[in-house]
Image: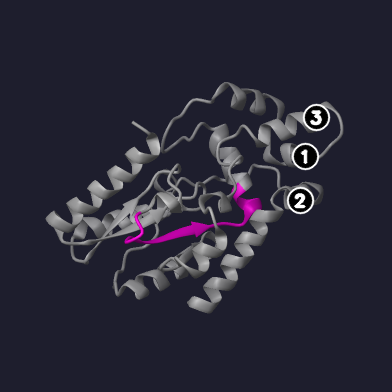
Amino acid sequence: MNLKKYKQQFLKFNDKVNNIVYRRETIEFLHIGKNGGTAIMNLMRQINAECKEPYFFNKNNHSINLADIPLNHRYFFSVRSPLSRFSSAFYSRKRKGQPRIYREWRPEEEVAFSNFEHANDLAESLFSEGDIGLKAFSAMRSISHLKKFQYNWFNQIDYMFYERPPIYILRQESLSSDIDILMSKLGISTDLDLTSDPLHAHKTDYSAIPALSEQAKKNLEKWYEADLFFVNTVNKWCDENA
């Protein structure tokens, strides 16, 4: 069976179950990797379990794009500063997803981490001439979450903002307050808090990790130029729709 067709059939089945059995509207969480999704769904899971609200929050995996979500489903998603997301993605894969999950490196990831010990090393090597620049380019295209930009989850950005807008967009940098806005728009009153447990929130401790240098930041801003534009557009949209 075609994978995309299977995904669409699964979403329709999930929607049918929730509407017939639970009589709840399915709200889709479009899950862009390394944007606080684990903490967000920890909250949504608690709301689902209470069965007090007329909604069922469905967490999609990273392969699901907006085009895969049924048109009659409302949705939301989260974004993050591309530079912060870069560091989070690098170290998440360096530790193979632990402590929450374990996923062995793919061969190309093993090569990438053998060449670059820290995120700053990789970022500083971007656009360099010679062998190190080629290795950095390959690493950026090999490590999970680094090789897919946030705007890649949307086939047409203008369509998303104007024709099929989300309920709200959560920003990792202001996650708690943005969740309050989302809950308010859905008419949900809850005292649930974002977990601070790194096992559940899947956070990285950066205290012993080298900070990004100015050259590293400059290189990343060049690499993520289109994603920075996307996130800036999201920020403007959120300010206008809060």
Tell me the residue at 66%/61% (across/down). 229
Q: Is 169 displayed left or right of 135 in the figure?
A: left
Query: Which image quarter: residue 4?
Result: top left
Residue type of the residue flagged with mark 3: Ile
Residue picked out by circle 1: 126
Residue picked out by circle 2: 222
Tell me where residue 85 appears, x and y as whole percent: 59, 49
Give the secondary structure at mark 1.
loop
Q: Which residues are magenta?
A: 70-85
Residue type of the residue flagged with mark 1: Leu
* Residue at the farthest right position: 129
Give the secondary structure at mark 2.
helix
Residue picked out by circle 3: 132
Give the secondary structure at mark 3.
helix
Which of these two is toward me, 72 or 195?
72
Query: Which image quarter: residue 54?
Result: bottom left
- Disc ID at residue 14: none
